[in-house]
Image: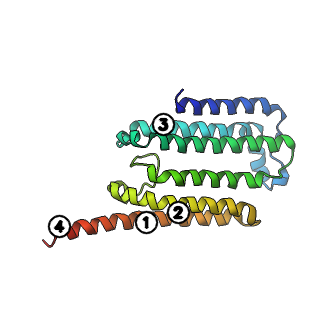
C-alpha cells in the first residue's frame, strides 16, 4: 500500500471516530476554555468533530497536487522518503490533536489540552528540522525563498543550516511547554517569526556568497 493511501485511510479513520463520538460531544465548546461565546457556538459539535480531519485531508490533497504540477517534480525521486516522512508527521500531528480534543470533550475536562498542542507542534518541528537537509528543490516542502530557488547550492546550504535552527526551535517549544505558564503563545509566535527571518537571511547570505565566488572567478571585465 502506498503512503498516500495509508495517510488517507488514517484520515478516514478519524472521520469514523468523529461520527462515533459526535452524539456525545457538547453542543458548544465549554465556556471555561475562555473562548468567546459566539466562537463557542459556531465551533459546536459538527465543527469540532470534523475540522481537524478535514484539515489533514486537505493537506494531503494540496501537497499531492503541488507535487504533480511542480516544475521541479523530477527532484522528488531524490527525496521521496523524506517527503513521505514530513507528510506522515503532519498528518499524525493533526489527527493526534484531534483525538486529544475529542477525549477532553468527552471527559468534560481540560487537564492536559494546554500541553498537547505545543508539545505535538514541537515534536513535528523537530522531525521537519531533521528532514530539511535531505530535501531537494521543489515547490511543496522546504525553505523556499527567491535565493534558494535560484541556486541549488544556496538551497543545500540553507537547508543544512536550517536543520539545526529548526530542530533547536522545536526543542525550545517542547521545553517551554512544561516551563512557561503564561504567555506561551506569544513567546512561540515570536520565536517562529525570528526563525523565519533568520532562515531568510541565511538563504540570502548563501546565495550572495555563491554569487561573489562567481564574480571573483570571472575576474575583472
Callout 1–callout 4 Cβ contact below 8 Å: no
> CA–CA distance between discs 1 and 3?
28 Å
Give the labeled residue for mark 1: 202
Closer to us: mark 3 or mark 4? 4
Up/down of 133 relative to 1, above or below: below
Q: Which of the two labelled residues, at mark 3 and mark 2, occupies the earlier sequence position?
A: 3
Question: Can you give x and y, in whole percent of width and height, for residue 123 in the image?
Answer: 63, 52
Q: Residue at x 63, y 60 (%)?
A: 171
> CA–CA distance between discs 1 and 4?
24 Å
Q: Helix, strand or loop at disc 2? A: helix
Q: Nearer the viewer, residue 25 or 71?
A: 71
Crowding at mark 2 (Cα within 10 Å: few <14, some 14-19, many 20+): some
Q: Is residue 218 left or right of residue 16?
A: left
Crowding at mark 1 (Cα within 10 Å: few <14, some 14-19, many 20+): many
Q: Residue at x 35, y 43 (%)?
A: 72
Callout 1–callout 2 Cβ contact below 8 Å: yes
Give the labeled residue for mark 3: 64
Give the labeled residue for mark 4: 218
Give the labeled residue for mark 2: 165
Q: Which of the two labelled residues, at mark 1 and mark 3, occupies the earlier sequence position?
A: 3
Question: Can you give x and y, in whole percent of width and height, for residue 210 in the image?
Answer: 30, 64
Visible residue check, residue 28? no
Q: Which of the two labelled residues, at mark 1 and mark 2, occupies the earlier sequence position?
A: 2
Q: Nearer the viewer, residue 99 or 30?
A: 99
Q: Quadrant of the C terminus?
A: bottom left
> CA–CA distance between discs 3 and 2?
27 Å
Q: Residue at x 35, y 39 (%)?
A: 74
Q: Is residue 59 left or right of residue 97?
A: left
Amino acid at each position: 500500500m502506498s503512503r498516500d493511501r495509508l495517510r488517507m485511510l488514517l484520515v478516514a479513520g478519524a472521520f469514523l471516530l468523529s461520527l462515533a463520538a459526535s452524539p456525545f460531544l457538547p453542543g458548544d465548546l465549554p465556556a471555561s476554555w475562555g473562548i468567546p461565546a459566539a466562537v463557542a457556538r459556531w465551533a459546536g459539535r459538527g465543527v469540532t468533530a470534523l475540522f481537524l480531519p478535514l484539515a489533514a485531508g486537505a493537506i494531503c490533497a494540496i501537497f499531492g497536487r503541488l507535487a504533480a504540477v511542480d516544475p521541479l517534480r523530477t527532484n522528488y525521486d531524490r527525496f521521496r522518503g523524506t517527503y513521505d516522512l514530513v507528510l506522515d508527521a503532519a498528518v499524525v500531528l493533526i489527527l493526534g490533536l484531534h483525538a486529544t480534543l475529542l477525549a477532553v470533550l468527552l471527559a468534560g475536562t481540560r487537564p492536559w489540552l494546554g500541553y498537547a498542542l505545543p508539545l505535538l507542534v514541537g515534536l513535528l518541528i523537530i522531525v521537519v528540522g531533521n528532514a530539511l537537509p535531505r530535501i531537494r528543490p521543489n515547490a511543496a516542502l522546504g525553505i523556499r525563498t527567491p535565493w534558494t530557488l535560484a541556486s541549488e547550492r544556496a538551497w543545500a546550504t540553507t537547508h543544512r543550516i536550517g536543520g539545526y535552527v529548526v530542530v533547536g526551535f522545536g526543542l525550545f517549544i517542547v521545553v517551554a511547554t512544561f516551563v512557561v505558564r503564561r504567555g506561551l503563545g506569544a513567546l512561540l509566535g515570536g520565536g517562529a517569526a525570528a526563525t523565519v527571518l533568520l532562515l531568510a537571511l541565511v538563504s540570502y547570505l548563501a546565495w550572495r556568497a555563491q554569487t561573489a565566488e562567481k564574480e571573483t572567478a570571472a575576474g575583472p571585465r
